[in-house]
Image (tube, rainbow, N blue to C red):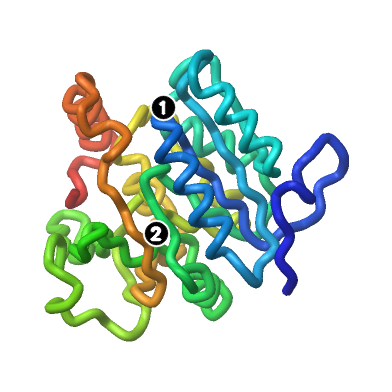
């Protein structure tokens, strides 16, 4: 397969087929977004991909930075106000046509060889709808590990352990869900599972999608052979509404499913 930049696949005319759509949702922090784009541009080789940025910041200081990304070839979707994470993900999904979609937070960084293990998870097992990578902090602590157990008794073994001391499995692990910070979806499954539930403004949309995928007969897997760096809530860590939004999403998940996943 050859690499095709988003500059050659985005535009007003017919879109060439691509292997992977990389959808980055941003909210302010142009420095995080630009570093994210640069890392994935540098380390996504061997696959035709389209880079799609969905910005929830609204009019203002992000405009010039988004203009620059467009000139560099990204397809940029600009929302007039914060549409919420799930809705922004759906906009990015709808804008692409790749066989696979990777939903990304703007505080995630690519590392060499991150994509092939995720694609192999999908190619080797057509029943896999969702795959997630190993996510570590810049100093090596595990923050993206699978949620295992049962829907009524979920847990996350290894969370916040250092990767140097935690024994990582050599093969993909079937699980309940994976982190939405870097979340690969098989596009073909959307016809059966649907899109992200936009009733979740932020948080729990990933667990909800994974649960729906599993109930539709698909599998969710964690692929530790793929490694990405996550700065962990760098965009919204100090946002005054963060705790309130989290609690609202938790209550919605509870009403919908009668329980809460591990977080």
Residue at point 48% right, 58% down?
Answer: 184
Task: Determine the image quadrant of residue 235.
Answer: top left
Give residue 28's mark. 1
Front residue of 198/66: it is 66
Task: Determine the image quadrant of residue 178.
Answer: bottom left
Label 1 and label 2: CA atoms lie apart by: 34 Å
Q: Earlier in the sequence, mark 1 or mark 2?
A: 1
Task: Tally the numbered discs.
Answer: 2
In the rendered image, the quadrant that contains the N terminus is: bottom right
- Which residue in the protein does label 2 denote? 214
In the rendered structure, the answer to whether residue 118 lies left or right of residue 220 reads right
Horizontal and vertical percent position of residue 41: 58, 56
> Badge 1: how crowded within 10 Å, few (<14), some, or many (20+)?
some
> Badge 2: how crowded within 10 Å, few (<14), some, or many (20+)?
some
Residue at point 70% right, 49% down?
Answer: 6
Front residue of 223/44: it is 44
Considering the numbered disc 2 on the image, is that residue within a helix, a strand or a loop?
helix
Give residue 120's mark. none
Seen in the picture, residue 101 relative to 80 is either above or below; the reply is below
Seen in the picture, residue 246 relative to 234 is either above or below; the reply is above
Residue at point 52% right, 41% down?
Answer: 195
In the rendered structure, the answer to whether residue 40 lies left or right of residue 183 reads right
In the rendered structure, the answer to whether residue 134 lies left or right of residue 219 reads left
- Contact (CB < 8 A) between labels 1 and 2? no
Residue at point 40% right, 47% down?
Answer: 209
């Amino acid at each position: 397969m050859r690499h095709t930049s988003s500059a050659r696949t985005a535009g007003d005319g017919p879109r060439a087929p691509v292997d992977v759509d990389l959808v980055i949702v941003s909210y302010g922090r142009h420095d995080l977004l630009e570093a994210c784009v640069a890392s994935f541009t540098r380390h996504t080789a061997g696959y035709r991909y389209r880079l799609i940025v969905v910005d929830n910041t609204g009019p203002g200081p992000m405009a010039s930075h988004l203009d620059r990304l467009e000139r560099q070839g990204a397809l940029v979707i600009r929302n007039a106000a914060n549409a919420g994470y799930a809705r922004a993900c759906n906009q990015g999904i709808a804008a692409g046509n790749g066989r696979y979609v990777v939903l990304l937070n703007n505080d995630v960084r690519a590392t060499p060889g991150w994509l092939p293990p995720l694609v192999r998870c999908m190619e080797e097992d057509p029943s896999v709808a969702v795959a997630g990578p190993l996510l570590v902090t810049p100093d090596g602590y595990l923050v993206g590990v699978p949620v295992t157990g049962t829907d009524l008794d979920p847990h996350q073994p290894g969370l916040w352990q250092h990767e140097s001391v935690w024994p990582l499995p050599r093969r993909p692990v079937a699980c309940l869900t994976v982190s939405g910070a870097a979340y690969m979806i098989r596009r073909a499954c959307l016809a059966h599972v649907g899109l992200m539930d936009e009733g979740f403004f932020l948080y729990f949309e990933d667990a909800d999608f994974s649960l729906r995928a599993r109930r539709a007969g698909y599998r969710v897997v964690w692929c530790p052979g793929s490694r990405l760096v996550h700065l962990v809530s760098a965009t919204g860590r100090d946002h005054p509404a963060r705790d309130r939004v989290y609690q609202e999403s938790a209550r919605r998940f509870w009403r919908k499913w009668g329980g809460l996943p591990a977080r």
